[in-house]
Image: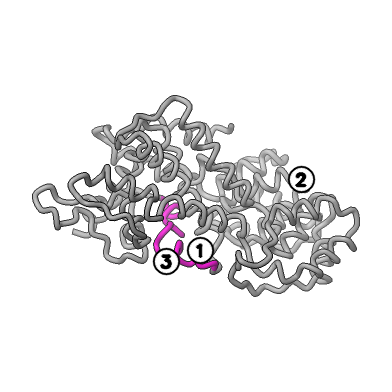
Amino acid sequence: MGDYTQFMAEQESQISPEDENYKEKLLAVAGSFRDFDKALDEFIVQKGFEGDISDIDAKVKFIKEKFKDEEIPIENRNIKNWFVNHVRSDKRLIAFQFCFAFHLDIAETQNFFRRIYLQRGIDCHDITEAIYYYCICHGLSYSQAQELIAKANPDSKKRPIDFNGDVLFTGTIIEEIDRFETQEELLDFLDKNRAQFGYNNATAYRYINQLWKLIGGPKGIANGEAKLLFPAEKVIEKNRAISDIYDQIFGFKDYDIYDKNSRLFKVKTDRTLQPILKGNSLIHPLASASFPDRQGLDAILKGNNKSPEVVRKTIILLAFYRYWAEICVKNNNLYCEAQPDETARCMASMNKMLTDAGYPALYEGNPYDWIFMFAAQDAYPLDAFRFFMRELYLNKAETES
């Protein structure tokens, strides 16, 4: 674990909702996540850069030469922009070009996406990225990868996932590619299964559907927890609106003790939390972007295409809630203190879902992941998460008043 990762991990156990300076500590954490250029600094040092790390021109030259050696085009101004203006590159093509330019193996490539790019690893349910996966595994060059992509002629159009039909899961694709010894085998497989590459995230969508059935059904976890949260109310076992359950998950469903009809936390729209998150100083922009909401989950449950970030963040949220709320419901106790081994079990179950679906495991240096890793360290993880979300709400209300 590097110094940066270690530092962010330490913050998880050093902050409690009960701290008098809780808000100030959250502000400090939000400002501690490193920019893209700092992550690149660490990367190029590991890959042989021996110059002054504060010398931008030297860093640009080092990266440019690596790209040039592999005949990969890149403009100096783009590289310099990362270091001068702290601009984050989010184009996956550039990430793959880095992997080829620096001769990363498959494990290093996945780690580059996880720790430097803060994105999902190689998506083998995409023909172009499946070819990159094959080429990196076999030590082929970037130019050879481009030749294979041209021959495969990938179609960028995506369609909804139909779980009632035949579904080719990403894990199966990877197993097939791993056994290919020739480029012809790869191209033949891609061509014969072209229709199955018209959608992404099949495994992730399956997990999300399974989680939502456990959470949102008439006898689901959310209704079971609602009976504990609101004992004076009669909770009817029925399917509830996604937005209503999300309000409960986020801790926004509390009522004024003096007026049972008055909600303490009123979100402006039931479609998204962006009115609370956008420009909020307590949450990093990378965490607030693509934050789970009603419209995202609704689209996923219908099989419609959503961005990898929306999908990954939705898995994390639902898996976290399912784990801790289920414990409360099973024990008929809203305030079950987490046992010593339960945090590790929760993280392991979440990471299994993520990696099974082709997404990177939780990472302390990812601002969104940190929220849940922080909450999981608390004696009352679900309560800690809700306290954090309410603090976001109150901070936004203060800045707008």
Give the quadrant of the N terminus.
top right
What residue span does the magenta drawing correspond to? Answer: 284-303
CA separation in Å, label 3 and label 2: 38 Å
- Residue 381: x and y in percent read 37, 37
Asked if residue 296 lies in the magenta stretch, the reply is yes
Cβ atoms at labels 1 and 3 below 8 Å apart: no
Label 3 crowd (10 A; few <14 / some 14-19 / many >=20): few
**Residue in the picture at 40% in, 45% down:** 30
- Residue 350: x and y in percent read 53, 42
SS state under label 1: helix
Amino acid bearing label 2: Asp
Q: Earlier in the sequence, mark 1 or mark 3?
A: 3
Q: Which mark is residue 295?
A: 3
Q: Which mark is residue 129?
A: none
Label 1 crowd (10 A; few <14 / some 14-19 / many >=20): many
Q: Is residue 140 left or right of residue 64?
A: right
Q: Which mark is residue 300?
A: 1
**Residue in the picture at 61% in, 66% down:** 164
